[in-house]
Amino acid sequence: MPKFKRKQLVIVTVYDESIPGGEFPLLSRIREVYLGNNEGRYHVCTKYAKVKDVIFECEIVDADECIHEYDLEDDFNFHINGRARVQSLLEAAQLDPKFPQGESSSDESIGEGEGEASDVEEAGGQEDRVSNADAEANGDADDEADESDEANVEDIGQEGSQSDNEPSSDVNEEDDEEDEHHEEDDDGEEEDHQEDDDEDEDDEDEKEEEREDTEMHDLRSKNNTDEGLRDRDRDAEDRHAENQEEVREGQSPATWIQMAQADPVLQKCIPGLEYAIKFGFPSLQRLDRYRDSVSIVFWRLKTTPLLMDKGEMGLAKTYRRTPYYSNFRSLGLSKCNKTGPHIPIIVSSADEDEKRTGRAVPLDRRVHPFPHGYYGLCSDIIHKCVSDPFCSQTFSRYFRSVFEKRNEERFGSFVAFCEEVIVPCIIRIWTFEDLRRYGSVMTYMDVDKIICSCRAQMFTGLLRDMPNNSARLKKCGLARLVRDVSDIEWMKTMREVEDGLISCFVPDPLEVNALGSSAV
């Protein structure tokens, strides 16, 4: 069942380096919904243009859920059959009056002096006329009125050569009749706009009127000039695009997997991307902040309830029931020659999809995996915070007291204990908190399979070349894996954490040397 319905008001985030902040929220309506094997793909339109590119579900957010985050008005009272056609979301965003004009693309200047003009240039020429008609509720009536105005301007331009020509005055009379006809249609459409069933019938009538208006426009422009020829070519392209749009439902658009297979980097990471989408991993930008900021890791440790809880569910009471502690203990005993060779316990990460497709990786008990999941690149920072007193005296003192009280020095050093037991347990808790909100895990056993998965580590490996890999993912329609809507508020909070603006996040007296400062 598709998540979004036809004509639903949504927000599509447009990502581009030329936009201040790297993104722009674009108010849109769902124009087409793909079903069956293509479920999760849509075509959208804005108030000013139709977008030809296929938009994936992960790029779309219901406007009712996040309209307050973007400080935009819900003023989209328009039909879904806009006149202008553009290829990409960026081109559609450039037609929006709220788009930063200083950073707009120079694509409009491309093609000046050429024989043909692009759809984007035509849409840009109509932008001023559309913006003057924003106060009207019906966007289609605006488009028809604009077309009539454009025809009148062309007639005025030809007045010098046809001032004594009788057919020219006839055409002007027809224009007046058309204007009256459009005004009557506008009144009727405003009344019918409240009912969806009547709106569908209006859409079909409007398409017929658009074709008739196009034919009249061809007659007026039939003067064998270069401008007239270009107008006829553009109208023919519009009609061809409409015909292609009517039969598109029987075709299959390129999936993100097909686009990723064409990329030399992403084709090696497709299993990891599938895993991230299936379980709802945090975005790469959020994981990247953990990797490059000790303050953010320290804040997450301080706000993890079970980390220093001395109750039955606290980490001090539960770490001995994990496979990570069993491996730490088994390895320590084998070094003392008290038992046989060390055979680590390896948690299988094979799920039903892997078994069904025959991609399950056989377990190698000679290899001791690192159960860090998608937090693998920040595991060193976590280890420093819990074991190094120069980084955090609170955590190091607490876990050292647990280490000494349980007599864990029999199996290894305190640093090894934190690395092999405490760090995986912390990542286990964090992963459970992340994915429980998404509903993809229910128990810690489910989490163990994820953090021991090579596919989770494959996904987080994309952080090593974050700028280029982000562009690759956005090109394949996986912008949600780069940055999610929920990251906006989270990023703001993390900036306040780094700037010391969180009043409740104040280090206690033991944190004299916190966050990497030198020892006293």
Image (tube, rainbow, N blue to C red):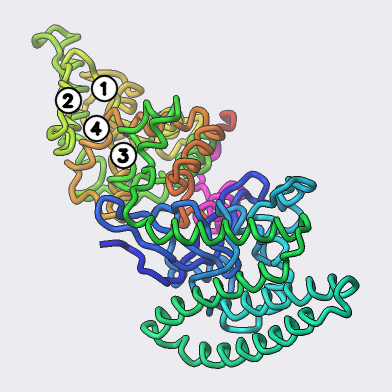
How busy is the neighbourhood of tag 2: few (under 14 within 10 Å), some, or many (20 plus)? Answer: many
Q: Are marks 4 and 1 in contact (CB under 8 Å)?
A: no
Q: Are marks 1 and 2 in contact (CB under 8 Å)?
A: yes
Under circle 2, the secondary element is loop
Mark 4 and mark 1 lie on one chain; the one further toward the N terminus is: 1
Under circle 3, the secondary element is helix
Mark 3 and mark 2 lie on one chain; the one further toward the N terminus is: 3
Which residue is denoted by mark 3 in the rendering? 274
**What residue sits 50% from the left and 55% below the top?**
52
Which residue is denoted by mark 4 in the rendering? 405
> Mark 4 or 1, which is nearer the eye?
1
Mark 1 and mark 3 lie on one chain; the one further toward the N terminus is: 3
Residue 481 placement (x, y as % from top left):
43, 44
Query: What is the spatial separation of the Cα atoms under label 1 and label 2, in whole angstroms?
Result: 7 Å
Q: Which residues are the magenta region?
A: 489-513
**What residue sits 24% from the left and 18% below the top?**
368
Query: Tag 2: residue type?
Result: Ile
Question: Which residue is farthest right?
Answer: 160
Mark 3 and mark 4 lie on one chain; the one further toward the N terminus is: 3
